[in-house]
């Protein structure tokens, strides 16, 4: 499992839009959409309900986000801890 895709999922849920995440990362929104589509394919489940005006997590997407978000926070904390130790 690609951690960058999981981080993308977390950011999309928090921002509510592919474009907002893309703007924060300074990338094309289609790259965010492709990352989510790839994750959905890997999992075999739809994570977001997409309409022209709205992007909302599906039940599976919400559940997955609830499980993944704390893990991604721990990964970030581990990176910070290593940086502090190695200075």
Image (tube, grey):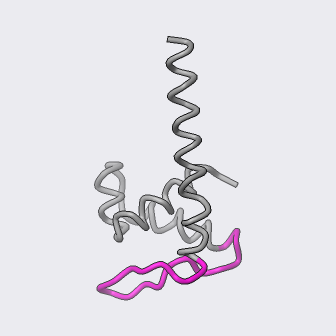
Q: Is 70 one of the magenta-colored residues?
A: no
Q: Position of residue 57 (x, y in %)?
A: 48, 78
* Residue in the image at 59% along x and 59% along y: 68
Q: Is 48 one of the magenta-colored residues?
A: yes
- Residue 25 vs residue 43: left or right? left
Q: Position of residue 17 (x, y in %)?
A: 34, 70
The segment highlighted magenta reads 41-60
Q: Looking at the picture, tell me which residue is in the foreground, 81 or 46.
A: 81
Q: Quadrant of the N terminus?
A: bottom right
Figure quadrant of residue 28? bottom left
Residue 15 in the image: above or below residue 79: below
Disc tally is 0
Q: Position of residue 4 (x, y in %)?
A: 55, 50
Residue sitting at the far bottom = 51
Figure quadrant of residue 59? bottom right
* Residue in the image at 51% along x and 63% along y: 9
* Residue in the image at 52% along x and 53% along y: 7
């Amino acid at each position: 499992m690609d951690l960058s895709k999981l981080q993308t999922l977390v950011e999309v849920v928090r921002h509510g839009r592919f474009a907002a995440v893309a703007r924060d990362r300074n990338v094309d929104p289609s790259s965010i959409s492709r990352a989510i589509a790839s994750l959905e394919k890997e999992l075999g489940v739809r994570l977001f309900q997409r309409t022209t005006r709205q992007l909302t997590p599906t039940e599976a997407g919400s559940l997955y986000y609830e499980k993944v978000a704390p893990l991604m926070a721990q990964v970030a904390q581990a990176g910070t801890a290593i940086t502090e130790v190695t200075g």
